[in-house]
Amino acid sequence: MAFKLDKEEWSQLGTFLGLVESELVSIGSLNMGAQEKAFRVACMWRSRCKMGRSQMVSQLAVALEEIHRKDTAQFVIEQFLEGKGRKKFFGW
């Protein structure tokens, strides 16, 4: 999923997934590309998420739609429905 995002979409996604401003600033200061930052956002969110897998997929898809990435939201849902592993789904 992270490899599909670009520019500042990682920051917008982080906001909709509940990361706080200081976390986003910290990620933004890292010397890496947008896709790597999106990966960090996903990792932080996933590590503190207490939901089941289907609820996580739903929340992630909604967040992606909020940042106008319906294509990526659809990708996430399709990967979940097809039973793809975490590596394909989250990028790890």
Image: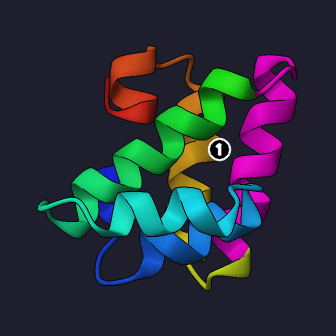
Query: What residue is drawn where x is 45% and y is 77%?
Result: 9
| Magenta span of residues | 49-65
Asked if the stretch drawn in magenta spans residue 60, the answer is yes
Asked if the stretch drawn in magenta spans residue 72, the answer is no
Mark 1, Cα crowd under 10 Å, few <14 / some 14-19 / many 20+, is some
Give the answer, above or below, for where 82 lies relative to 21. Answer: above
**Please, which colouring scheme is shown?**
rainbow
Q: Position of residue 19 (x, y in %)?
A: 68, 55
Along the line of sight, which residue is nearer the eye, 14 or 63?
A: 14
Q: Position of residue 37 (x, y in %)?
A: 32, 57
Along the line of sight, which residue is nearer the eye, 79 or 87?
A: 87
Q: Which residue is mark 1?
A: 77
Query: What residue is drawn where x is 12% and y is 62%?
Result: 31
User: Helix, strand or loop at disc 1?
Assistant: helix
Along the line of sight, which residue is nearer the eye, 78 or 1?
A: 1
Left or right of residue 51: residue 30: left
Along the line of sight, which residue is nearer the eye, 30 or 76?
A: 30
